[in-house]
Amino acid sequence: MTKAMKKRLQLICGIALIVLSSLSCGAILGYLAGSRNADDGRQSLRQIRDDLFALMVKDLKLNPEQQVQAGEILDRSMERMAAFRIKNAPEMLMIIKENNQAFRSILTPEQQKDYDAYRQKKLEAIKEKLFAEY
């Protein structure tokens, strides 16, 4: 394996780790919103899984057997992440709240206004996405 291939593999593994460990806010809001919107988190996770799979097939040149195995691994990871998010939603929301309070504490009053406006804009975008069909 060449040095360039090792770097690319490390990049793919890093992306996979980041993707699988960072999907929280939209899925939590979807879960808390209830009804079919809870599936939106799974849908976004499915899209990420599919994109990651396509990247791995292309960049690593997986043979058909490896493609099946990689797909199964990603599917298992997706199901585990979805279950983890649901199980840990309250704690994740608490962490997000604490994080936001910590950020506000280091900002000037003017920056706090900008930060609050930014957060409100992001929350509105998430709500719009979740309830677009209603």
Image (cartoon, helix red, strand yellow):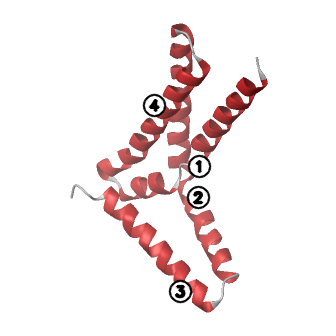
> Which class describes the residues within 10 Å of circle 4: few (<14), some (14-19), or many (20+)?
some
Q: In the rendered structure, are the residues bearing label 4 and label 1 in contact, judged by CB atoms less than 8 Å apart?
A: no
Front residue of 28 and 5:
5
Residue receiving disc 1: 22
Which callout, 2 or 3, points at the residue further toward the start of the chain?
Answer: 2
Residue 114: x %, y % from top left = 53, 82
**Three-letter code for the amino acid on which mark 4 is drawn:** Asp
**Three-letter code for the amino acid on which mark 1 is drawn:** Ser
Front residue of 75 and 16:
16
Real-space Cα separation, disc 1 to disc 2, in angstroms? 11 Å
Where disc 1 sits, the SS reads loop
Real-space Cα separation, disc 3 to disc 4, in angstroms? 39 Å
Which callout, 4 or 1, points at the residue further toward the start of the chain?
Answer: 1
Where disc 4 sits, the SS reads helix
- The numbered mark at residue 113 is 3
**Three-letter code for the amino acid on which mark 3 is drawn:** Lys
Residue 117: x %, y % from top left = 47, 79
Residue receiving disc 2: 92
Which callout, 3 or 1, points at the residue further toward the start of the chain?
Answer: 1
**Which label lies toward us, 4 or 2?**
4
Q: In the rendered structure, are the residues bearing label 1 and label 2 in contact, judged by CB atoms less than 8 Å apart?
A: no
Residue receiving disc 4: 50
Real-space Cα separation, disc 4 to disc 1, in angstroms? 16 Å
**Which label lies toward us, 1 or 2?**
1
> Which class describes the residues within 10 Å of circle 3: few (<14), some (14-19), or many (20+)?
few
**Three-letter code for the amino acid on which mark 2 is drawn:** Met
